Each structure stands twice: as C-alpha cells, then as structure tokens.
Amino acid sequence: MSTDKSDREDQKINWDVYLQAYYEKPASTKTWSGYDVKEIYTPDDRAAENYQANIADAGEYPFTRGLHRNMFRGRYWTRREVVGIGSPADTHERAAYCFENGGTGLNTIADVTYEMGLDADHPRAHNEVGLTGVNISHIKDMETLIGDIPLDKVSWSLITASTAAAATMAQYVAVARNKGYDISKLHGSIQNDPIHFRYCGFSPACPLDLSIKLGSDVMEFCTREMPKWYYTTVNMYDLREQGITAPQEIAYGFGIAMCYIDELIRRGLNIDTFAPRFTFYVSCHMDIFEEISKIRAARRMWARLMKEKYGAKDPRSMHFRFAVHTAGCSLIPQQPLNNLVRIAYEALTAVLGGVQSLHCCSYDEPMCLPTEKGHLQALRTQQIIAYETGVTNVADPLGGSYYVESLTDKIEEEALRYMKEVEDIGGTEEAIRSEWLDSRFEQEALKRQKELDNLEKLVVGVNVFTTEPEKTTPLGVQRISENSSKDQIEGVRKFKLSRDKIKLEEAIDRLREDAAAGRNTIPAMINATQAMATTGELLGTVREVFGYSYDPLNIIESPFK
C-alpha cells in the first residue's frame, strides 16, 4: 500500500480500496510475542484470585504492583538520555546540555573500541574512535569526561557493559579519589554485564569465565567499598533486541543474573548484603499491555526467586529495580518522524509499568547518533508524560484489569517454562558454552522476520503505508569530526610516552599477581590507572593471566614482557 503524492497524481483513485479500508479490522489479535488473547476478559478470568499472595498492594511482597506504595507521588523516575559522542570533551558538553534541559541523571555510553578493551591508538580503532560512544583510554580521558560535574551530587550511569566495565570502574574511582571524594558516598550505576555482551558482537572481549570473574570483581568491590552504587545492570534489553519474546527476555535475563549471584555467594557474600544493589535494563516494545504485564511479572518472579531460592530476608533484596530503554529495534529509517510516536508510546508503557530510570531513544537513531535536537525531543517526551498526562498520580493504574492481570500470569507461566528449559540442559552457563542460547536467538530472529515478510506483523513504513525513501532527515544528522578521532589517537600516543615506566610496570605486576592469585582485581586496577596504565593494558594483563591473547583482536602484543 502506498500513499506517495506522485503515485496519487499518476493513478486514478480506486474507491473500492478505500471502502475495504473503512471496514478493516486487525489482521492478528496475538500479542507481539505471539500469544492468543480473548475478545474480552471478565471476572470469570480471575475467579480464583489470591490478591495478597500473588498481587498485593504496591510496596508489599511480591511487589507485582510496584516497589513503593506511593510510587511517583514520592519521586518521579530518573530522566536520563544516553550520551556518547566524539571525544570525552564532546560527550561532557552534550551531557551538560541534557542537564540544562531538565535531565535528572547522567548516562554516558562507551564506543566500540572501549567496549572491546582497546586503546584509541589500536591499529583497528582508527575509524571507530568516538563513532558510537565515548572512548576512555586512560585516566586523563576520564578526568575530561567528568570535568566539573559534582560526583557527590549527581547520579551517573556508566554504560560500559563488557569486561571493560572493570576498567571503567577503576578509572572512575581513581579520578574521584584524586578529586578528594569519599567513594562510599557516591551514587550511580555501571552496566557491568559482560556475560550478555557476547550477544552484541563482543564475544572476543567477553569469554565466559573472564566475564564472570571481572563482572563479579566489580560487584564485590562496590558491595564492600561503594554501598550506594548500583554495581550491575543486567541487560535484558540487549537480549530482547535479538528478537526474542517478552517471557524469554525475563527468563534469559534472570539466568544471566543468577550466574553473578552464584559467584558472589561462592565468594562468601550474604545475599542480603549485595542483592539490594542489583538492577536490570528492560526493553519496552510497542505492545503496550504485554510490556506492562512483563514488568509486573518480572517484579513478582524476582521477589520469589530471591526469597525462595536464595533465602533473602531483607525486602530490599527482593526488589526488581529496573531502567527502561525504549526499543531501539522498533525504530526505522523510513518516515523517521513516526519514530517520535513509537518512542512516546513505549515511554508511556515504561511509566505505567513503574520504571525507576528511563532513557527514551532519539527518533534519528536509525540514521545516526542522536543529534542535539533529537536528544532534546526525547527528553521532552519524558517531561510531557511526567507533567501533563496524569499517569503518575496512581500506583499501578492498570492493576486489577482482568486483561492485564491475566496477561501478567501468562507471561510469568511462559517465563518459568523457559527457565526450566535452560535448567534442564544444565543451566545458563552451559546454555552459553554449548551455544544453545545462540541458536535460540537465531530461531527467534528468523521468526520475527518471517512475521514481517508474511504481513503477520505490520509496521508503518516497512510493510504497510510505504512511501518513496526519504533523502534527508528532518532535523539533520549528527556527524563526528575526523579531527576528533585523530586528536584522540595522537593524545593516547603522547600520553604513553609521558609515563614513569618503572612505576607503571610495578603497578602492572601487582595487577598480574592479584589476577593470578584469584584476588579481586579492582584495587590493583585503580592503582595501575593512577600509575597511568591504559584501558588496553589493564584488560590485556588480566586476559593473559586467564590464558587469552593480550589483544582481543590478536594484533598487538603486551608491552610488559
């Protein structure tokens, strides 16, 4: 179907087509994840309801309706926009812009080279530095990124997901200490979920054993030294972007979370000591009721998992804390302004689900990094929901809906079935090692594509109401200066020539010894960062201890032989 102006001028209108459209009805009544739903839900669907045991008021176990009784009456969610563009100075400037326009939390994201654990002067990094985020090669870069931001007053979300998160944490703490901050009082979070990042194209940087080791090192360090810091955000969002369903998002995400929890318990930590700082990233797709039900089911399931499987006694350990990214994969380059509508619905869904922290994608992300105008519009979307729609007045406003409660039960049932499936093949670690999980992602991605090809799922601009491809983006595109990349590369080279080599080698030796002895590597990484070790040097040293090549891309050798 096409509505392009040139088509209309060249073709005589077929009014029969319009008549068919007038009587059009949904081609499918399944949810986005493919579940059949009834024409109407009634009290008969909830006849055996045990409200207190399965739903309860917001703020009460199992927290189906929310973590706090007053929810947004007590405090709005944290309104963030993900920023990572060009150099550390460029990223600092854009982050400050978001703050000036009403952002209430910082959110900076690493570029591909940093996530891979490479310095900006790596031979394969030349065309990638600063292209998809910010590169932090050394402590001076982190100092520039932080600039004059008061670390004791802001909530900073550091989006480094891979094993490089260990280096990020070390660099952040090193700069904070150099500036005189008491790190035990700092608020914020780090993504630090290297297990999942193998499914985002970073498997060379995220072997499973090293992912569990370094991810858990960050969690253990923060539990002991930074009690107000959220030390992981298990990324269910990225898993969902692979094409899996809403219940699979919960099941596979919880499976990865349990890998870290089991490791922390093995290290001797009590569940109630660390669980209150465990958080998740959740996706919000276009099926509003399914996504709200997914969030409600996840809250209930996590509470029961913590209490019944791990023996948690502190209610805070049972809280499913989550941030939402609106679904990047739902955005398309065709008719890009339509993405504003998609983002708004997805953000509304997150708020109706009781989100703690929200990032709205920018409408222009299918084409480029967010422009300044794109970032501003995404932020304004959150502010309109917060201040104008009235949806924040009541906790869990859809609670009690026969449909939503039934769909919440259905998603929980399906997610538990998927978790049992993983358990039967030996658990999540085995599902990853055997690539069983890889094959699941491939199957689901193929299924989603077939649904589009067969018109079982309709997406405006893709397989319905298509138009000629646009030649421009309405509010322009974000471009990264070539000089930005060149300056960063040259800066790293000069930095490496300026260091005290004896002090540096002593710090690297200590890091190598701690890694070999099975000790937590973060204190040694902080020390090495202060001795001017780079990101690639920190991670390469630990990689070699674990039997991997110094360089994930196997191109350069360690300078510390």
Image: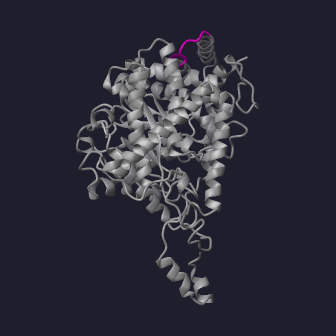
Residue 148: in magenta span: no
Q: Position of residue 48 (x, y in %)?
A: 32, 40
- In the rendered structure, the answer to whether residue 378 lies left or right of residue 447 reads left
Q: Nearer the viewer, residue 193 or 316?
A: 316
Magenta stretch prevailing secondary structure: loop
Residue drawn at x 34%, y 38% is 64
Q: Looking at the rendering, which quadrant does residue 306 occupy? A: top left
Give the quadrant of the N terminus. Answer: bottom right
Give the quadrant of the C terminus. Answer: top right
Residue drawn at x 36%, y 31% is 319
Query: What is the magenta range?
Result: 517-524
Relative to residue 204, is residue 362 depicted above or below? Answer: below
Relative to residue 554, is residue 523 depicted above or below? Answer: above
Q: Nearer the viewer, residue 450 or 410?
A: 410
- Count of picture labels: 0
Q: Nearer the viewer, residue 13 or 500?
A: 13
Visible residue check, residue 163 = no
Q: Position of residue 472 (x, y in %)?
A: 58, 69
- In the rendered structure, the answer to whether residue 329 lies left or right of residue 351 reads right
Residue drawn at x 61%, y 57% is 451
Relative to residue 229, is residue 460 depicted above or below? Answer: below
Residue drawn at x 59%, y 35% is 197
Q: Position of residue 460 (x, y in %)?
A: 54, 66
